[in-house]
Amino acid sequence: MVIQTAWAALDDEQLVPTRPAAQLLGVTTKCLEARRLRGEPPEYVKLGEGPKAPVRYRVGTLRELVRRGLRRSTSDPGTPVAA
């Protein structure tokens, strides 16, 4: 899959915009926007001030969110993700 290949090539410290972050997580940009409003993970970086300032996500943060979501069974609570 192209997204997985691109994901593997990215450095943990690299910042990516909302659309690629959403694609890497398999969610919509609206989902990430809603999570930002509610203060839910993943953490993000805002580059500047005001409502139009660009938002970026650290690749390492996205990878950690995926890792914490891993489960072995439906009864596995996994690693809690702090809000």
Image (cartoon, rainbow, N blue to C red):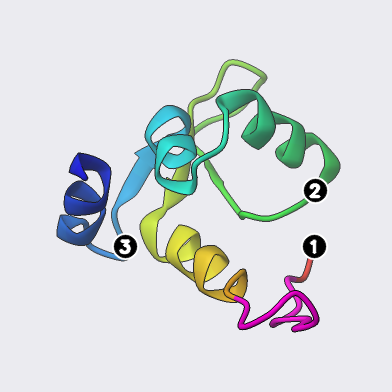
Verify CB contact (< 8 Å) between mark 1 and mark 2. yes
Earlier residue among tags 1 and 2: 2
Residue drawn at x 26%, y 43% is 3
Residue type, label 3: Glu
Instruction: Assign a secondary structure to mark 3.
Output: loop
Residue drawn at x 40%, y 45% is 24
Earlier residue among tags 3 and 1: 3
- The CA distance from mark 3 to mark 2 is 21 Å
Residue 42: x %, y % from top left: 61, 54
Nearer the viewer's eye, disc 3 or disc 1?
1
Instruction: Assign a secondary structure to mark 2.
Output: loop
Residues 8 and 14: in front is 8
Residue 79: x %, y % from top left: 69, 82
Residue 51: x %, y % from top left: 66, 19
Q: Provide the major secondary structure of the magenta segment.
A: loop
Range shown magenta:
71-81
Residues 6 and 74: in front is 74
- The CA distance from mark 1 to mark 2 is 6 Å
Residue drawn at x 19%, y 41% is 2
**Mark 3, residues whose alpha carbon is within 10 Å: few (<14), some, or many (≥20)?**
few
Residue under numbered circle 1: 83
Locate residue 21 relative to residue 35 in the image: left or right. Answer: left
Q: In which quadrant of the rendered view does residue 80 lie? A: bottom right
Residue 10's mark? none
Q: Residue furthest top?
A: 52
Where 4 falls versus 52 (above or below)? below
Q: Is residue 70 magenta?
A: no
Residue under numbered circle 2: 39
- The CA distance from mark 3 to mark 1 is 21 Å
Residue under numbered circle 3: 13
Earlier residue among tags 3 and 2: 3
